[in-house]
Amino acid sequence: MTPHADWLRPEWQVERVGALMTTRQGGVSRAPFDSLNLRAAVGDDPHAVARNQRLLADAIGAVPVYLNQVHGASVARLTATDLQPGAPVRDADASVTTEPGIACTVQVADCLPVLFAAPRGRAVGAAHAGWRGLAAGVLEATLAQVCAAAECAPQDVQAWLGACIGPTRFEVGPDVLEAFGAATTKGSTPRFVAKGPGKWYADLPALARSRLQAAGIGALGGGRWCTVSEPSRFFSFRRDRVTGRMAALVWIDRARAG
């Protein structure tokens, strides 16, 4: 199997690195999880989810390592140990690896996935950035771990933002503004647009870009798709509540490693 034509791919050209984000296309699950739901325990048939996960692994030629995402800032360093049968699922919202054939994987259905690649694939990473994790520093922590693993500087690393809830759909309250140090007034800012009393629209990709740029990231791409606005293409928890999950993955290619 090859990656589905509808799946998203970073614009970067990083030697030895493969990366993509799935859409809801290309799997076997039935509605409302149609068709490539990659997460169990959301109400889908577990056999369908397992088949979808196998289809994804076959398509990328690497082994996705899924996390128990907790909306925090912890970063797991993945090794061959994580591929062994019975290996525990890590409690983390990001992962980093230097080993070929291991796909750093995050699951999303409105939160922002961010993929990282160091030069020549010396290290890669994936982060799940909902507003809580983003405010807690999950992107900065992932970038730091990629740099440490690859022995490079932040400006050497490329990052790509996948599909998430868009800036005209993500309604938030004052708690979110306060988490990012924004003033909870009736006015607007470049990243928070006032909607009404106590309500704003938040621009999740813009918040991520600003934090990564402040951390010194070398290059940024993506972040132009809204999961809520395209129901035929993307799962969205905010829109549907009962729905599947997509995945964003990055890996070091086995065939070109060395």
Image: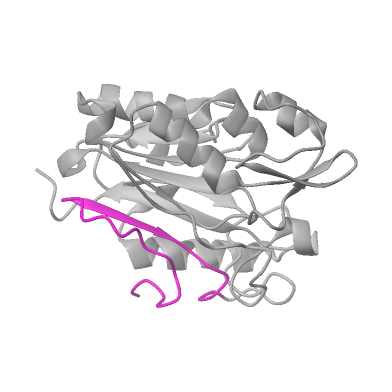
Where in the figure is residue 185, as x and y percent of width and height? 80, 31
Seen in the image, is 81 located left or right of residue 13? right
Q: Is 255 situated above or below 141? A: below
Q: Quadrant of the C terminus?
A: top left
Q: Is 82 situated above or below 64? A: above
Q: Is 159 situated above or below 231? A: above
Region rendered in magenta: 1-27
Where in the figure is residue 118, as x and y percent of width and height? 24, 38
Find out whether residue 206 is within the magenta segment.
no
Q: Quadrant of the N terminus?
A: bottom left
Seen in the image, is 13 located left or right of residue 59? left
Q: Main secondary structure of the magenta part?
A: loop
Q: Residue at x 32, y 30 (%)?
A: 146
Q: Residue at x 61, y 37 (%)?
A: 69
Q: Residue at x 15, y 43 (%)?
A: 120
> Which residue reaches farthest right?
197
